[in-house]
Image: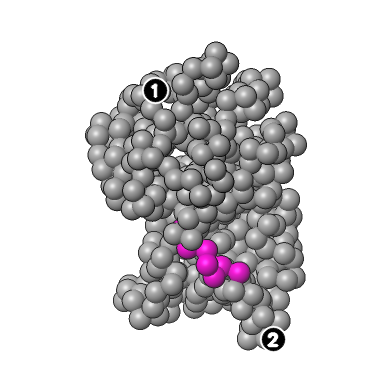
Amino acid sequence: MNIETQKLSPEEKRLDVVVKFFYPVVAGIETNILNIYSYLAKQGWEVVIHTSTSIPNSSEILPLKGEIQGLSIQRYKWRWYGFVPKIDWSHSGSICLHNFNVFPHSWILMKALFLKKFHQTCRTIFLVPHGGYTPGWWTFTPFQRIMKRLYQKYIGTFLINHAVDGLRSVSEWESEETVKSGVRREIIETIPNGIEREVYSDIEGLASKSIRSLVRELGTYIVQVGRIHPIKNQLTTIRAIAKVSGVVFAIAGPVTDQAYKQILDKEIKILDIANRVRFLGVVDGIDKYYLLRHSLANTHMASWESYCNAVHESMSQGCVCIVAKDTALEELIKDGVNGYVVPVEDADGVADRIRFLMENKGSIELEAIRRRNIAFTAGHSWDDLARLVEKFYERVLLRHR
């Protein structure tokens, strides 16, 4: 029978999703999981999220059980070995591992490999690394870097090649880097992240009074959406702002690294630009898109990205984006075509682009960039991308019968 005409049984449409953090954490991985699997739940899939009782800065603060948007949540206390999810391995559905943590992913993959090696019943295994297999290595301590690199080179890659049935990457850049690291190309499918449904709503009409007032107060501003963390590298844009007069840098996102926030505060004081850098905290929903839409530009000089939800979202609002070179950001932004690409720490280069934007507001070139970005993100809703994920999972599950 043609695989395209076959249908999955209700038992096969059971997904056990394993991830270290989940809602109420709403960073890139958690947002992907919530949007993709809530869509699948609406299509009749039974989804259980196995996660920890922790959030990044606090341990064991969440309840053991929960439910959100049709997803059942089973939480466990995080230990050095991760946690042991309660999964029925005799079931014919699948296990979906998100990120690429050493624990509990390694022992789950080892068990899957053992079962397959000895021709025992085994769940279909999916892996969605979100850049966790191809990370920015400088973000780890020297000891962690050595151990994780050794693990991935000699054990992790072997386990992926022999235990994983389908690997979903979020960008072509991540796919290529994964293949370069030794993973079989034939198991990889590239499906990017989506955009929230608010993008397609009446943003001008629904924006809150508070965000309208804030935007008027900011005047001419550039914006960066994302957590305050070294990897997001707000420092380069802060240094660039000091070189350009008449523009404010608005930073929208939570502080996830207090030490880095102190570094930024110190630099702002040294440069004497406290009145031109605004930390807005978390701005979400309609208000986030209103903030993006009315900005001069979106800067995102992150030192490492496997994709970037924030830039993708800003493109939907016609933002001109200034992004960092040599990361997956270049998959979204082509220099001079739909934005500008600058080396990660080149504050002078960022300042030059900001100056150009200020001097050429409303120009044919910039209006063309805005139109290209809006057109690029058409059809990129989370539901659109979730349909692609569903087809990928179905295809792999049917082959696994």
Residue count near mark 1 (Cα–Cα under 10 Å), binned few <14, some 14–19, many ≥20 = few
| Mark 1 or 2: the one toward you | 1
Residue type at mark 1 is: Ser
| Quadrant containing the N terminus in the rendered view | top right
Q: How is the image coloured?
A: one colour
Q: Any mark on residue 211, and which?
A: none
Quarter location, residue 79: top left
- Residues under labels 1 and 2: Cα distance? 61 Å
Q: Please, what is the dominant secondary structure of the magenta stretch?
A: loop
- In the image, 283 versus 187, the foreground residue is 187
Residue at (72% x, 31% y) in the render: 182
Residue named by callout 1: 90
Q: Any mark on residue 364, and which?
A: 2
In this picture, which residue range is highlighted in magenta?
376-382
- In the image, 329 versus 44, the foreground residue is 44
- In the image, 231 versus 395, the foreground residue is 395
Q: State the SS at label 1.
A: loop
Point out residue 92 in the picture as x, y percentages from the top left corner. Answer: 42, 30
Assess whether residue 377 is covered by the magenta stretch.
Answer: yes
Point out residue 251 in the picture as x, y percentages from the top left corner. Answer: 49, 60
Residue type at mark 2 is: Ile
Residue at (54% x, 39% y) in the render: 396
Residue at (69% x, 86% y) in the render: 364
Residue count near mark 2 (Cα–Cα under 10 Å), binned few <14, some 14–19, many ≥20 = few
Point out residue 334 in the picture as x, y percentages from the top left corner. Answer: 72, 64
Quarter location, residue 378: bottom right
